[in-house]
Image (tube, rainbow, N blue to C red):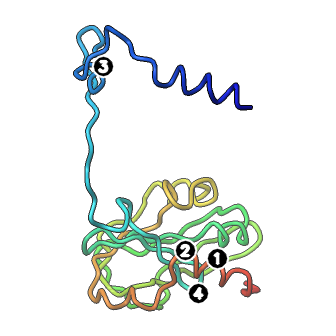
C-alpha cells in the first residue's frame, strides 16, 4: 500500500516542461476555446424549491408565478391518467379550492390549488396527452401556472423532506 501511495505522489508532483499557467485555465480546440469560470450564488439553490400539499399537489415558485402539478406518489396512486380537466386561463382560484380533475382507469381525483391567484397558463399538452402526468409529473406533466395573490399561502406548504415524512404516515 505504501508503495502505491509513493508512486501516486511521485506522478502527482511531476512537472511537465511544456505546461504553462496559461494552459491550465484554457483548453484550445481548433476554432473553439473552452474557459473555466466560477460563479458565486447567494440563494439556497438555483432551481426553484418544490413545495407540497397534504393532498399531493406540488408547486414551484419563480418570482410571483407558481407552477402546479401532482406528486409522483399521487400519480402512482391514480394509475394511468386518461383525462385531465384543468382550470381555464384567466380564472381566479382560491387556496385549497377545487380547480380541476384528473381521471384514470381506476379512479378520479379532484385537483386542489395550493395557492390563491389567477391562472395564467394551463398545460394543453396534458389535456391532449394526459399520460404525461404519469411519465413526467414534475417536468412535462405540470398542470397549470398561477400568478400568486398572497405569497403567505406558501408558508403552510411542506418542503420535500417534510413531504417524504408525511408520505410515511398518509394512507392516501
Callout 2 crowding tier (Cα within 10 Å): few <14, some 14–19, many ≥20? some
Of residues 164 and 135, the one drawn nearer to the viewer in this rendering = 164
Q: Specify the quadrant of the image occupied by residue 120.
A: bottom left
Q: Where is residue 138 shown, x and y percent of the image? A: 52, 61
Image marks 4 and 2: residues in contact by CB distance under 8 Å: no
Callout 3 crowding tier (Cα within 10 Å): few <14, some 14–19, many ≥20? few
Q: Earlier in the sequence, mark 4 or mark 3?
A: 3
Q: Is residue 33 above or below residue 137?
A: above
The residue labelled by disc 3 is 27
Q: Earlier in the sequence, mark 4 or mark 2?
A: 4
The residue labelled by disc 1 is 164
How far apart are labels 2 and 3 at the CA level? 40 Å
The residue labelled by disc 4 is 54
How far apart are labels 1 and 3 at the CA level? 44 Å
Q: Where is residue 137 shown, x and y percent of the image? A: 56, 61
Q: Is residue 132 above or below residue 96?
A: above
- Residue at 28% x, 14% y is 28
Identify the secondary structure beneath mark 2.
helix
Of residues 37 and 122, the one drawn nearer to the viewer in this rendering = 37
Callout 4 crowding tier (Cα within 10 Å): few <14, some 14–19, many ≥20? some
- Residue at 42% x, 69% y is 49
How far apart are labels 4 and 1 at the CA level? 11 Å
The label nearer to you, 2 versus 3, is: 3
Q: Specify the quadrant of the image occupied by residue 109.
A: bottom right
Left or right position of 135 against 61: right
Image marks 2 and 1: residues in contact by CB distance under 8 Å: yes
Q: Earlier in the sequence, mark 1 or mark 3?
A: 3
Amino acid at each position: 500500500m505504501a508503495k502505491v501511495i509513493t508512486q501516486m505522489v511521485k506522478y502527482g508532483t511531476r512537472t511537465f516542461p511544456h505546461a504553462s499557467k496559461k494552459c491550465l485555465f484554457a483548453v484550445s480546440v481548433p476554432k473553439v476555446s473552452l474557459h473555466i469560470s466560477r460563479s458565486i450564488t447567494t440563494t439556497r439553490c438555483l432551481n426553484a424549491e418544490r413545495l407540497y400539499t397534504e393532498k399531493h399537489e406540488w408547486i414551484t415558485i419563480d418570482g410571483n408565478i407558481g407552477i402546479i402539478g401532482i406528486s409522483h406518489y399521487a400519480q402512482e396512486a391514480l394509475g394511468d391518467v386518461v383525462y385531465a380537466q384543468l382550470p381555464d386561463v384567466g380564472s381566479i382560484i382560491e387556496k385549497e379550492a377545487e380547480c380541476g380533475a384528473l381521471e384514470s382507469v381506476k379512479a378520479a381525483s379532484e385537483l386542489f390549488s395550493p395557492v390563491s391567484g389567477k391562472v395564467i397558463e394551463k398545460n394543453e399538452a396534458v389535456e391532449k396527452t394526459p399520460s404525461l402526468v404519469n411519465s413526467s409529473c414534475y417536468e412535462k406533466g405540470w398542470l397549470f401556472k398561477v400568478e400568486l395573490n398572497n405569497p403567505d399561502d406558501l408558508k403552510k406548504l411542506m418542503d420535500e423532506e417534510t413531504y417524504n415524512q408525511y408520505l410515511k404516515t398518509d394512507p392516501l
